[in-house]
Amino acid sequence: MTRILVIGAGLGGLTLAHALVRAGLDVRVFEADDGTGERTQGYRIGLSPVAMEALRASLPPRLYDLAEATSGSLTGPGLLFDEQLTLLSSDLPGPEESRAFDRQVLRQVLLGELGDRVSFGKRVKTFTDEDTVTAFFADGTQATGDVLVGADGGSSAVRRRLVPEVRLVDADLCGAMGRTPATDRFRRLVPGRGTMVKGPEITLMLGRMQFDREPSEAAAELTPGLPMPHRESYVRWVLLVPPDHPAATAPPREEARELVLELIEGWHSELRDLVRGADLSAVGRSKVFDRPMPPWPVSRVTLLGDAAHLTLASGGNGAATAMQDAVRLSALLAEVDQGRHDLLPALAEYQRDLLDRGNAAVEVGKRALSRFIPAGGDAR
């Protein structure tokens, strides 16, 4: 049986793990984090029909049912307001059929039924690639398999070994974000798939996370025993600041809420109260690769998701692409395991697909970002 080592327990790595289990392969996942604690990363994510189909193909049916039950609709108009909530447009472009997911809830779903196949606190230091692959971890342990998949994000240690000439650079984009409980008052600000507020030099984006079913209650019924946080519906907000804005070069604040309140001084009270009511917030700068990902020498080591195609914020584009990577790679490795494909040619075929799909996704992200902050830095 083919043994697969997956480095990274994000959405892409866990989707791959489930797909490999369904295909009957031996898989182990190694995550650098010490546990499954809160990851902000935008709080919620939209998954397109393509991503939903990848989840359906990878997850056991009851976990897919739980994922679907704990998602939310992204239908309805996309609204554009000015900073005083004067309606400028009710026809902003956006996905019509995508589903909204809370990232932490979805990650808990994806951890379901993998059990001891996932190990935490395993930061990979290096690996060897000979007749087998062996990963060496910072805690002194190691693991050996037939294939190693770097699904360890934009700062991937695996990618740095495979493609050292590609560097991670600042995208000249600062984002402050928060999560505010979705009271009736704030829910009215986002009646559809999303709302954009354009103010002088800055853009505030609002997205709803309205769970079809409260996650812990849904899990108790559909997957008894699966740990799931209690999570009420919320409005996710993100403030994008142009590269030449003073806030983009200032040291990150401990509380994104205070940064945003300073920047939207004088805006409509509904927007200020939305930010003031946040129960969680963060500040971050986006990173990108300094060039399109080139091919690398085909071996038993490959990449998946952000490790190969780090996309700017684009409505779940990166996650959808990673999930497609997972479905494609698992199918090819299943053929290898069944003796219908040789390993290295299969990995070469996967790499070609990965680079075509991934580099195209990066370009989609860049085009999507231009809708929010056009060239020149003027958010109007």
Image (cartoon, grey):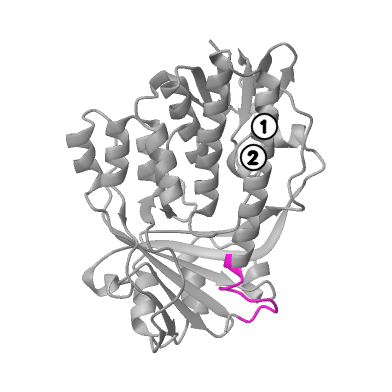
Which structural element holds mark 2?
helix
Residue sitting at x 21%, y 41%:
218
- Total labels drawn: 2
The image position of residue 265, as x and y in percent, is 47, 83
The answer to whether residue 221 is visible is yes
The answer to whether residue 31 is visible is no
Amino acid type assigned to the residue bearing label 2 in the image:
Asp
Residue sitting at x 63%, y 74%:
242
The image position of residue 228, as x and y in percent, is 29, 38
Q: Quadrant of residue 333?
A: top right
Residue sitting at x 35%, y 37%:
109
Residue reaching furthest to the right: 165
- In the rendered view of the protein, which quadrant contains the C terminus? bottom right
106 in the magenta segment: no
From the viewer's perspective, tell me whether residue 325 is left or right of residue 57.
right
Q: Which residue is mark 1?
A: 349
Q: Which residues are magenta?
A: 368-378
Q: Is residue 370 above or below residue 351?
A: below
> What's the CA distance linking mark 2 and mark 1?
6 Å
- Mark 2 closeness class: few <14, some 14–19, many ≥20 residues within 10 Å: some
Q: Which residue is mark 2?
A: 353
Residue reaching furthest to the front: 340
Nearest the viewer among 154 and 246 is: 154
Q: Quadrant of residue 337?
A: top right
Nearest the viewer among 197 and 33 is: 197
The image position of residue 100, as x and y in percent, is 36, 55
The answer to whether mark 2 and mark 1 are in CB contact below 8 A is yes
Amino acid type assigned to the residue bearing label 1 in the image:
Glu
Q: Quadrant of residue 3?
A: top right
- Mark 1 closeness class: few <14, some 14–19, many ≥20 residues within 10 Å: some
Residue sitting at x 59%, y 35%:
151
The image position of residue 27, as x and y in percent, is 50, 20
